[in-house]
Structure formats: structure tokens, C-alpha cells
Amino acid sequence: MDQIKIGKFIAECRKKVNLTQMQLAEKLGITDKAVSKWERGMAMPDSSIMLELCDILNISVNDLLCGEVVTMDNYNKEMENKLIEMLRQKEEADKRLLKLEIVLGIIAILPLIAAVIIAIIIPMEEWKAGLFVGLSLLPLLIATPFAIKIEQKAGYYECSKCGHRYLPRYSNVFFAMHINRTRYMRCPKCGKMSWQKKVISKE
């Protein structure tokens, strides 16, 4: 969504109904600074007040999200564009999440690597070395469930049998055998077990 365009549209509509930023803010129970941020394209109205805002400005929610009054002629096209934009934004967010998973994994495994190197270099009794290395596993054990949650939520898994792409339950991902992000799971569509790779887009 083009926040700058939407902000200018809000300002135009506010002026058409003869309201100042302060008056609009009072009607919505917010501060005039919030309205100012909308109109400068620095923020979007919260979903909880969006319907009330549109009612005050005599526009539809679709008009607001498009940053212009949408006629019936271009309504379908605008809706299609918004859907495409929402899908693009989700894909970008999923890519960032998967990068975060990698960073989390690296940070969690560094203490283990450091502990093994120290245990090799510095002479110490076996039980002490074992305890030292064992304790260094804690960050990895703590981070693993969070990393799996990120992987489960970001993107989709694609069945190698029927090509169906879906979002599995966390427990399915957690307990599945895996090679990197490819996991051996049952497809909810065809019901077959297969190695399913992680993909970003639904189609």
C-alpha cells in the first residue's frame, strides 16, 4: 500500500467534510498527532477505528486502502492489485523470517563450537570438559523450538507427490525427520508421506 498516497487522500477527504486534524482526532478519540502522521504517510489508521474513520470521511474502506475513490469500473482491478500486493508483502516478510531463523541458529550454535574448541585446547578433566560442553548446548536447546516455529509459519511446504502447498501444524514440523528445511511429512491433500520442501509462495 502507498502510505503517502493514502495520507494525502485522508487529508483531502478531511477537508471536504470541513474538519481540522484536531476535530477529526476528537471524533475518533485519538490525538491530532496521530492524524498528522497518517496524512504525512508515516503511519496507517488502526484497524479498530478504520470503519469509523471511513464513515466520518464518507468513503469506503476500499477507497481508503487504495488512496482514492474507487469506481465500479476499476473496483475489481483495484481489489486484484491489493491482493497481489498483500501476497508480495507476505512473501517478503516470510523471507525475512527465514533469514532470522538462520541468524538464530548461528547464534545458538556458536557457544557449542567455542566450548568444544576450549575443551580441546585447555587441559581439563573429562567430566569437567563434558559438563562444559553440555552446558554450552543450552542456548541451542532453547533456540530450537523458536527456530522451528519460525520455519513452520514462514512460507509453505510443498508435497513432492501432488504438488499441494500448505501450512502444517507445529507438531508435524517439530517431530518430522528433516534435511535442512525439507521435512518428511504427510500431505493433507493426497495423504501420502513424502519429503516436502519449504517454498515461499502459495502458487
Image (tube, rainbow, N blue to C red):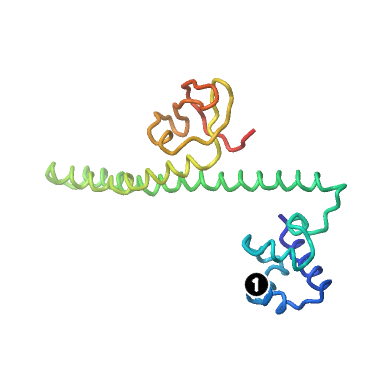
Camera-side residue of 45 and 157: 45
Q: Which residue is mark 1?
A: 34
Residue 44: % across, % down: 66, 63
Going by the numbered disc 1, the residue's amino acid type is Ala
- Write down the quadrant of residue 87 in the picture: top right
- The outermost residue toward the right is 73
Camera-side residue of 115 and 120: 115
Residue 4: % across, % down: 74, 63
In the rendered image of this protein, does residue 144 appear above or below residue 165? below
Q: Secondary structure at mark 1?
A: helix
Residue 189 shown left or right of residue 203 in the figure = left
Please rate how many residues cluster around mark 1, counting C-alpha atoms within 10 Å: few if below 14, some from 14 to 19, many from 20: some
- Quarter containing the N terminus: bottom right
In the rendered image of this protein, does residue 159 appear above or below residue 99? above
Which residue is at 51% across, 26% downward?
Answer: 187
Camera-side residue of 21 and 118: 21
Residue 12: % across, % down: 81, 69
Camera-side residue of 130 and 87: 87
Residue 141 shown left or right of residue 154 in the figure = left
In the rendered image of this protein, does residue 109 appear above or below residue 69? above
- Quarter containing the C terminus: top right
Residue 129: % across, % down: 17, 44
Residue 128 shown left or right of residue 171 in the figure = left
